[in-house]
Image (spheres, rainbow, N blue to C red):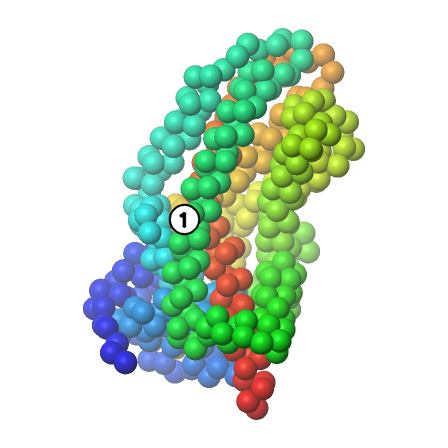
Amino acid sequence: MTTLIDTDLLADVQRFGAGDVSACFSCGTCTAICPLTDNDGTFPRRIIRYAQVGMRDELLSSKELWTCYHCGLCSDSCPTEADPGEFMAAARRYAIASYDPTGLSRILYTRPVVGALIATLVAAFFAVFMYAAHGPQDAASLALFTFVPEGLIHWTGVAVMSAMALTGLVGIVTMARRVARREGVSLRTMLGGGAALSRTVAALWAALGVESLGQRRYREDCKDDKPAEPWYRRRWLIHALTIWGFLGLLAATVLDWGLALTGVKETGTPIPLWYPSRLIGTVAGLSLLYGVSMFMANRVRQVNRAAKVSTASDWLLLVLLWITGASGFFIEVALYLPDAPAANHLGYWVFLFHVAVAMELMLFLPFTKFAHAIYRPLALFFYALAADKSKQTA
Ligand code: SF4
Ligand code: SF4
């Protein structure tokens, strides 16, 4: 098999935040200290080697790239200060941009001013688009869907979700084909027969249930937080609260939509706080807001290696998540405040802002760091399949 060499690869990965790893001489100190090495005596330095020698295809088809949680132990012990942990993070950003067919990820990661301009214009577009169809503002109560028609929000949301899903799917297929080819995994090895099928189901559970949602290795292996860091600031916890908060908000939206579809309750009908979709949304919103606020504070304070280097794209995702959560919470408070015309009046504009930013957030998901939420489980799936295979052959 021919290996194509990309002589610009290392310089390109450096544009995504990697430091100078040219001094790395593959001493293996990072391998010895990394809690995720398992039986792979070349992790993580092999990925650095790929970049050094320009093996782009090998780098982009490495499932190992996504198993690293950026704990920073390797960076603290590297004798050449190559910062392998940050290199792995930059290589993941590079991979996200490489799997993206539109080129938007690359712009958001490497051209912050242009990226900020695009983000502002997209949010402004959604706001103007919604406002163009606006109705009257009821001063007595916060009638949100009289101001911005529910149907317009619904169908714009469907269009945005479809665009997001399509782009995300292209990225998933691109990555899956690369990794599968390298790992020797095919539809036949995954689905051909009962034994193959049960191995696939077990690998899916390990990747999605145990690692992605349960974050087993994140909690157990990556002791990256300073010992003095209190439990409520632990990285795995705020990561979990952010994920679960986001998924909870998604679940509440789908539930609300389902209730409207089945005629149980029309969207926008006043409901008590304990109503299932409202309760899930409130708890999830607070969880998301807490997790994202802590992530932002950690980045400002640079409390750990993972928070030391922040790209504009990282901030964009956090800011969009925070604005969506905070504005949603504001609207909820305004909805339940009795006789608060001032809050109502402001509530309409906050609602318009909330919808515009939420649309942008959904549209931008596959182009920002959020994309790791799909690529990491996929890589962990291949990782679990490979672990099972080596167990069988041992
Ligand atoms: S990154 Fe540092 S610790 Fe790892 S192999 Fe290279 S020089 Fe050694
Ligand atoms: S950052 Fe942590 S998990 Fe990632 S390669 Fe380094 S030691 Fe391993």
Viewed as shown, does residue 280 lie left or right of 358?
Answer: right
The residue pinned by badge 1 equals: 167
Tell me the quarter of the image containing the C terminus: bottom right
Residue at left offset 43%, top offset 47% = 166
User: Element type at marker 1?
Assistant: helix
Q: Nearer the viewer, residue 377 or 258?
A: 258
Q: Residue at x 50, y 34 (%)?
A: 157
Residue 71 on image: x %, y %: 52, 65
View extreme (left): residue = 7
For the residue with label 1, is its CB less than 8 Å from the closest atom of ligand 2? no
Instruction: Give percent across and percent down for residue 153.
Output: 52, 27
Instruction: Locate residue 259: give its quadrant.
Output: top right
Q: Is residue 369 visible from the viewing direction of this image?
A: no
How many numbered dots are placed on residues in this image?
A: 1
**Would residue 197 be visible to someone looking at this image?**
yes
Q: Nearer the viewer, residue 228 or 136?
A: 136
Is the residue 189 above or below the residue 302 in the image?
A: below
- Choose between 238 and 93: the one closer to the eye: 93
Image location of residue 34, percent across then percent down: 51, 75
Q: Is residue 365 above or below residue 375?
A: above
Percent coordinates x, y for residue 15 in the rendering = 30, 56
Q: Residue at x 62, y 27 (%)?
A: 330
Q: Which quadrant of the view contains residue 49?
A: bottom left
Residue sitting at x 26%, y 76%: 3
Q: What's the amino acid at mark 1?
A: Thr
Query: Vertical placement of 221 versus 321: above or below?
Result: below
Q: Quadrant of ligand 1?
A: bottom left
202 over 141 or under it: above or below = below
